[in-house]
Image (tube, coloured by chain):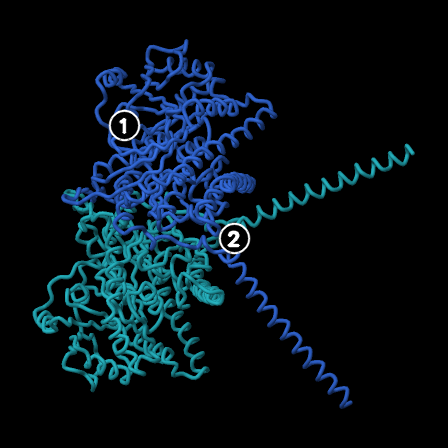
Chain colours: A blue, B cyan
Amino acid sequence: MRMFCCCTAFLLLILIPTGCEGGNILVFPSEGSHWVNMNILLKPLHSRGHNITVLRPINSWYIKDDSSYNTITVPVENILDQKLLTRLVSEAIQVERGALPLTSFLQKSVGMISLFLDIHKAVANFVSAILDDSDLIRQLKDSKFDLLLADPCSGSGVILAKYLNLPLVYNVRWLIFAEAHFSIAPSPLSYIPVTGTGNTVEMTFFQRVKNIVLHIITQTQNSLAVKLLYQKITDKYFGPGYDFNELMIDADIWLMRVDFVFEYPRPTMPNVVYIGGFQCKPAKPLPQHLEDFVQSSGEHGFILMSLGTFVTELPADITNEIAAAFAKLPQKVIWKYKGSKPATLGNNTLLVDWMPQNDLLGHPKIKLFVAHGGTNGVQEALYHGVPVVGIPVFFDQHDNLLRLKERGGGKILSLATVDKHNNFLKAIEEVLSDPSYRANMQRLSRLHRDKPVMPLDNALFWIEFVMRHKGAAHLKAESYRMPWYSYHSVDVVLFLAGAMLLVLVTTFYLIRCIYTGMCKYKVKRE
Amino acid sequence: MRMFCCCTAFLLLILIPTGCEGGNILVFPSEGSHWVNMNILLKPLHSRGHNITVLRPINSWYIKDDSSYNTITVPVENILDQKLLTRLVSEAIQVERGALPLTSFLQKSVGMISLFLDIHKAVANFVSAILDDSDLIRQLKDSKFDLLLADPCSGSGVILAKYLNLPLVYNVRWLIFAEAHFSIAPSPLSYIPVTGTGNTVEMTFFQRVKNIVLHIITQTQNSLAVKLLYQKITDKYFGPGYDFNELMIDADIWLMRVDFVFEYPRPTMPNVVYIGGFQCKPAKPLPQHLEDFVQSSGEHGFILMSLGTFVTELPADITNEIAAAFAKLPQKVIWKYKGSKPATLGNNTLLVDWMPQNDLLGHPKIKLFVAHGGTNGVQEALYHGVPVVGIPVFFDQHDNLLRLKERGGGKILSLATVDKHNNFLKAIEEVLSDPSYRANMQRLSRLHRDKPVMPLDNALFWIEFVMRHKGAAHLKAESYRMPWYSYHSVDVVLFLAGAMLLVLVTTFYLIRCIYTGMCKYKVKRE
């Protein structure tokens, strides 16, 4: 094909309508990185003239009451904070490094589930406190919100939306413990990898076995959280006859934080809108000291390393190994790091508390991103076309990185062996020297950016769509209200099989009857 | 919610990039209304600078070789023409009117299937003739096309695309005999109505039985066409090991000619792009004589009647009844009609050979559309928000109209009873006098038009996307390559059940063994 201009043919202009009054949006809180993701939507909604009200627990870790939104502080404590997360991360690192005997491993695994349940319990208490506070409920009803925006990683937002009878939009990747597609769209486990299995879209027989077993475990955890917490609140405030799982699926629009350059192709539904990479934007100029540092790398360029917001510290042997490896490279390195300075740190490595990650990833001199594999970091690497060496710590991070590795855009190192046999240095050098990693990431970047509507614009459009039309009922399949045997047509298949059997048996007896009759007639005649 | 401006917030500007060379598109032919739909895409593609080459049979009904595209005429005859279609329509009308005894009905039904197979045979011969013509194949290969654009209502386009190794985009609603979603997306028959059943998204038990039975019949017809025709060509030109059904599903992008204001919500796939209503556009001013006629209707407004391009004539008793009913109305009527003038025609009714349907449907004085229920007419009524009285003739027309009726936008009359008991007049008067019909259609129109990208722009974007990236492999699930028992995890479930059984049996025997051993030990001690 002859060349197309890269500017392509489409340009989307977003005009803020003058003289239009904005909508009125209620936001159900979510903590940590979930709030970061929610805030990416709230900022442009706020500047487009919408009124944003955020509910927050009294000691919210991330949601401050001096933000530019209206905040309503509920006197209930949030338990998810930096301390708890640091504990979780450090336990996950111990598990990943295989440093635990089996009994401790099992103990930690059970402890982690119980801890997750405690986090859900705190969010459940939070919504209960809101529903029990008649003044607050009156205030919320009087505010005449157009929409509730929630992240369904907890099940409380949907309960409040239902109670206030508000249209509901999800900013979503997880529904309680499971990837959200598994709740809304048919998801054949034969080719859709379950998070945590390390499977890809192509599985061997035993990988498919693992896929199904882990799916059963995840769904059991989900059922446990629903049964112990959310169904109880549903029963208390709505009376009998309301199934929490049905409420949960009944959202108008699901803004899904993936796209199909990152995610493997899978069935979807009309009310799922893909906004993966919605936080990505072209790089802005760097602060002068960073620009100077980066420029000093010359033709070798620089490496960026960040293990995300929550992994503040790794064990010292690992950080020393990483620092020593960096010191051997001709590249410069910017490393987001909060611990004590590694003894082996080279002159080419700059430790920073915070950095403008998007602007650094979009800098022309960047060569490599060393990352933990959080969805946002991976999407940003995809957007800017930067190859990745990943050191996954927990949850979906290995699966996220696998999606890059499978497409030739990076390598994955295990925490268990990252500090052994020069593994870290070898991986870095391979990705830096083999041009295919960069070429593949650049190709993925071109695919990711080539959309008729940019992900953030798409998210804003559908939020405003739901406000304009008071929901999106025409996009919602209501099949989840059917009993499972009807949904899967088990009743109809049994009926048809029965009917066929009846016809066969009747025909058989009829033929036998006629035959017997004829024989008798023959005998009689003889 | 406070009011939003209707101009909404989004404006899409399509800029034809200057200095960009266009792509090179090969179009596999489809006849009649399918060509009309294809041409809606080809015109803007052509004016955006793409080179369009259309393959056509020597006596093509619709594709003329004096068109503005390059045409390659293949010396093979097309059998689908106005004469054949008139025969089909007239037989369908006889069936619809219940005017046939059972034996004739069955005869006609079998005849119709055999006729459809003949039409497919002609298209299959057409592609065979292309593949057998080595000069033509060389010419096609030398042309270095970027893309093959086909309507998969026949299976020949995909065979040519595979032979030339070209990316493939479908402009699609039907895949051979079946609605296209059934081939590409999981389609639970418990809530997805099969065309021809007259079912909606909510079905009783016996409607679900009917749904499954008709699905089996449709799939059997499809298998017949594949086995008798397309698989044979596949075997001949690609050798063994190629399954035609797999090739058919392997298209890069499926531009689906519905949207979810028209269609019921159902599972979909990442490479399905919804372009329903892509032919709709704001009304242009009418020719003077029509504008004068329409204006003469005063406050009563006017009614538009069209039974589409192919239903040229209805039985005289029906047309007389319709004409007499129209004559009793205060509205003016524009009736697209080619037969002899009905005896009962009133002065308020203008018969026309052709009319600018989109401009009339978008005229402020229109009150009602009397239509046969073709997809395009229904989508245009939705776009302009005009209520409909439908008289379906055959195929999907009843199902299309049902989607409006269910949403309160119109009424359906049966050909069997349209001329009895003043049914036609009563239906027209009801829809004219009850404002809910118009209000519902206006609501649907608002939903239909409120999209971040207009359907035609979306179609053009994705066609150009496939050309830019030489396909859209990252959006295609390849699960259809799995054997059915793996796709549905039957093998894994059996394995897990077997493993559980083994564990249970082993445990049982172990316990029994220990118990027996203990008993023996006890006896011994005693």
The residue to which callout 2 is attached is B484
How many labels, in total? Answer: 2
Type of amino acid at the residue the image marks with label 2: Trp
Spot the residue most to the top.
Answer: A343
Is B170 or B201 nearer to us in this picture?
B201
Q: Nearer the viewer, mark 2 or mark 1?
A: 1
Image quadrant where one finds the C terminus of chain B? top right
Which of the pair A348/B386 is nearer the observer? B386
Same chain shared by disc 2 and disc 1: no
Q: Quadrant of residue B68?
A: bottom left
Q: Is residue B100 above or below residue B71?
A: below
Q: Where is residue A378 in the image (x, y as percent from the top left)?
A: 36, 31
Q: Mark 1 points at which residue?
A: A66
Count residues near mark 2 (Cα–Cα under 10 Å), then give few for <14, some for 14-19, many for 20+: few
Q: Could you tell me how far apart the alpha carbons at marks 2 and 1 are, in whole angstroms?
A: 57 Å
Q: Which of the chains bears the disc numbered 1?
A: A
Which amino acid, mark 1?
A: Asp
